[in-house]
Image (cartoon, rainbow, N blue to C red):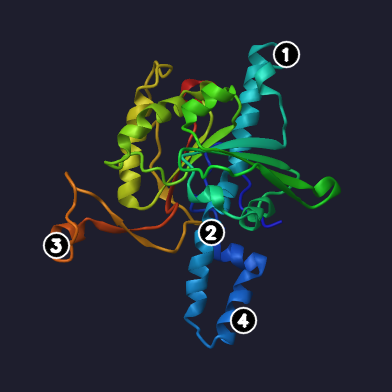
């Protein structure tokens, strides 16, 4: 097992400076770096190794970014259950049955990650020790999830070292899905990969969903990622505003929301991100200096933020 994290306290994140794991060390541990070097040598193109590494980073960024935080999500789950038991004199709460080695995650607004082949999600299981988590269930929810995708699962290992991952797919907005399927109090965490919460063209569509997520089940962890510093800053402002509006934060505190941090498992394959100005942009921008200055390279999951409402409302 290539272990990415060992979080025993809630204040650690994958982006901590003390955290030594990066995409490069992961590729070394898995033997992929040697394979890439051999392939580059075979092609007699030394520069192709970096390009191949960039391509691999694009597909691995989703499972590895999530793997880096699974133990933190489990920590929050156990803390919430323990707290609930304390407040009910040790009686088990029906909607919080302690499956101590399992977590269920909802990926909201899922897109490309919903169609990622299982062989790449396999890396998520390999990165998590079986003695900590042996079952991960992921629900991909959002209008951009392709229709017709069937539930699937796969298992690695055997006997006491068996680990399983399950996938389900729902081509609906989150609130509509929960109202139709009775999935209240189901998930242990939400994940929003590059949602663009503050993007001028997307902001309005996220308002209700973000409030739903932050108020869900008295607070579960929410993992946000962003394409670049502009995207991260815009999203941070939106999240901060939404957090300040949560009713159960009767006593506002300072520094409720950390800043986004660089993600060591971000994609290295960049694309041009156009930051639109007011109105519709012109078709040809080649001679528009102001437009060119608003372009910034976007990398999937370049910045990351883990937020847990329960820490701020006193639930844990």
Distance from disc 1 to disc 3, alpha carbons, whole Å, reads 65 Å
Around disc 2, counting alpha carbons within 10 Å, would you say few (fewer than 14), some (14 to 19), or many (20 or more)?
Answer: many
Q: Are marks 1 and 3 in contact (CB under 8 Å)?
A: no
Q: Are marks 4 and 3 in contact (CB under 8 Å)?
A: no
Judged from the image, the secondary structure of the residue bearing numbered disc 2 is helix
Distance from disc 1 to disc 2, alpha carbons, whole Å, reads 44 Å
Residue 97 falls in image quadrant: top right
Of the 4 image quadrants, the one containing the N terminus is: bottom right
**Residue 137, x across and y down, in percent:** 65, 39
Distance from disc 2 to disc 4, alpha carbons, whole Å, reads 21 Å
Q: Is residue 97 left or right of residue 232?
A: right
Of the 4 image quadrants, the one containing the C terminus is: top right
Q: Is residue 66 visible?
A: yes
- Mark 2 vs mark 4, foreground winner is 2
- The one nearer the camera, 18 or 214, is 214
Judged from the image, the secondary structure of the residue bearing numbered disc 1 is loop
For marks 2 and 4 on the same chain, the one whose residue lies earlier in the sequence: 4
Q: Is residue 129 left or right of residue 280?
A: right
Distance from disc 2 to disc 3, alpha carbons, whole Å, reads 33 Å
Q: Is residue 143 above or below residue 114?
A: above
Judged from the image, the secondary structure of the residue bearing numbered disc 4 is helix
State the mark number for residue 38.
4
For marks 2 and 3 on the same chain, the one whose residue lies earlier in the sequence: 2
For marks 4 and 1 on the same chain, the one whose residue lies earlier in the sequence: 4
State the mark number for residue 11.
none
- The one nearer the camera, 181 or 62, is 181
Q: Are marks 2 and 3 in contact (CB under 8 Å)?
A: no
Around disc 3, counting alpha carbons within 10 Å, would you say few (fewer than 14), some (14 to 19), or many (20 or more)?
Answer: few
């Amino acid at each position: 097992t290539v272990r990415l994290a060992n979080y025993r306290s809630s204040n650690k994140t994958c982006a901590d400076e003390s955290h030594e794991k990066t995409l490069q060390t992961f590729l070394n541990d898995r033997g992929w770096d040697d394979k890439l070097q051999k392939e580059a040598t075979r092609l007699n193109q030394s520069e192709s190794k970096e390009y191949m590494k960039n391509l691999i980073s694009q597909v691995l960024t989703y499972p590895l970014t999530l793997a880096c935080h699974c133990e933190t999500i489990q920590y929050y789950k156990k803390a919430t259950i323990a707290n609930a038991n304390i407040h009910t004199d040790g009686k088990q709460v029906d909607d919080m049955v302690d499956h101590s080695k399992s977590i269920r995650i909802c990926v909201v607004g899922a897109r490309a990650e919903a169609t990622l082949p299982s062989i790449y999600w396999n890396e998520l299981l390999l990165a998590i020790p079986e003695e900590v988590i042996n079952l991960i269930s992921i629900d991909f929810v959002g209008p951009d999830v392709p229709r017709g995708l069937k539930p699937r699962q796969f298992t690695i290992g055997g006997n006491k070292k068996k680990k399983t991952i399950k996938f389900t797919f729902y081509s609906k907005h989150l609130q509509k899905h929960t109202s139709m399927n009775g999935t209240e109090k189901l998930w242990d965490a939400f994940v929003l990969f590059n949602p663009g919460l503050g993007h001028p063209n997307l902001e309005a569509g996220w308002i209700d969903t973000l409030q739903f997520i932050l108020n869900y089940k008295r607070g579960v962890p929410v993992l946000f990622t962003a394409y670049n510093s502009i995207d991260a800053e815009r999203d941070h402002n939106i999240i901060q505003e939404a957090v300040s509006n949560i009713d159960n934060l009767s006593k506002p505190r300072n520094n409720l929301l950390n800043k986004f941090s660089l993600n060591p498992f971000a994609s290295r394959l960049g694309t041009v991100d156009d930051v639109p100005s007011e109105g519709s942009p012109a078709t040809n921008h080649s001679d528009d200096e102001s437009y060119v200055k608003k372009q910034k390279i976007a990398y999937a999951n370049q910045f990351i933020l883990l937020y847990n409402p329960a820490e701020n409302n006193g639930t844990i």
